[in-house]
Structure formats: structure tokens, C-alpha cells
Amino acid sequence: MAKHSDISWKQDHPSTLFSNSVQKAERMLKQAMSHPEEIAIEHTFNQIEHAENASLNAEQYGEHLETVQQNKEYLELIKQQLHEVQEKVKKQ
């Protein structure tokens, strides 16, 4: 198990966790775009779902609402782009 002593307490804030999960979804999307395969798409969908749960958590805590809103909008964009990649894969 990872030690938390070297990690700042800020990383445990719901809004930070949401930001981090959106960034991870973005990285996975880029991978799916460069290697459009079912498994990459599936992993990205799973990460988006994880990010959406983190979003709900951040909203419940009412943290940094402007940042949370920006991340939610960005996550929607990631979902649209992933859908386009998925369509490309289906046509292959």
C-alpha cells in the first residue's frame, strides 16, 4: 500500500480528486485517439465514470465550485471526443 506521508493533504480534497480524475481521463482519451482500440476506449469510459463520481463528491462538499464546473464542462468534451473515437473504431 502506498504511503500518504509524502502526499500533500490537499490531494485528498474532493475538488482536487475530481481535477486529477479529469486529467487522467484526458490522458486516456489521447491514448485512445492515437491507438483507437476497444480496450483503450473501454478504459477511458471507466475513467470518465470515475471522474463523474468524483464530480458528485466535490459538489456535495461545495468546494471550489468554479473549478468543479470547469472540470465538468471539460469532462463533457472528453466524452464527446471519446464517442467520436468509438465511432471510428466501429467503422473499421
Image (cartoon, rainbow, N blue to C red):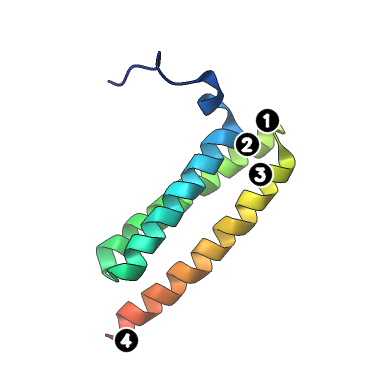
Q: Is residue 74 left or right of residue 5?
A: right
Is residue 24 found left or right of 75 in the rendered image? left
Q: CA distance from mark 2 to mark 3?
A: 7 Å
Q: Which residue is drawn at the image coordinates 69% and 33% (left, top)?
A: 63
Which residue carries the number 4 mark? 91
Residue 87 spot, x, y in % from top left = 39, 79
The Cα atoms of the two marked residues, 2 and 1, are separated by: 5 Å
Look at label 2 and name its amino acid. Ala
Q: Dot 3, crowdedness within 10 Å: few (<14), some or many (≥20)?
A: many
Q: Amino acid at mark 1?
A: Tyr
Residue furthest bottom as drawn? 91
Marks 4 and 3, how far apart in space? Answer: 35 Å
Say left or right for 33 vs 17: left
Identify the disc placed on residue 68. 3
Residue at position x 37%, y 56% in the image: 28
Point 64% across, 57% down: residue: 73
Q: Which callout, 2 or 3, points at the residue further toward the start of the chain? A: 2
At mark 2, the secondary structure is helix
Q: Earlier in the sequence, mark 4 or mark 1?
A: 1
Residue positioned 55% across, 42% down in the render: 19
What amino acid does circle 4 point to?
Lys
Q: Are marks 2 and 3 in contact (CB under 8 Å)?
A: yes
Query: Circle 2 is placed at which residue position?
Result: 58
Residue 7, x across and y down, in percent? 43, 21
Of labels 4 and 3, earlier in sequence is 3
Counting every numbered tag in the picture gives 4
Report if the CB atoms under discs 2 and 1 are less than 8 Å apart.
yes
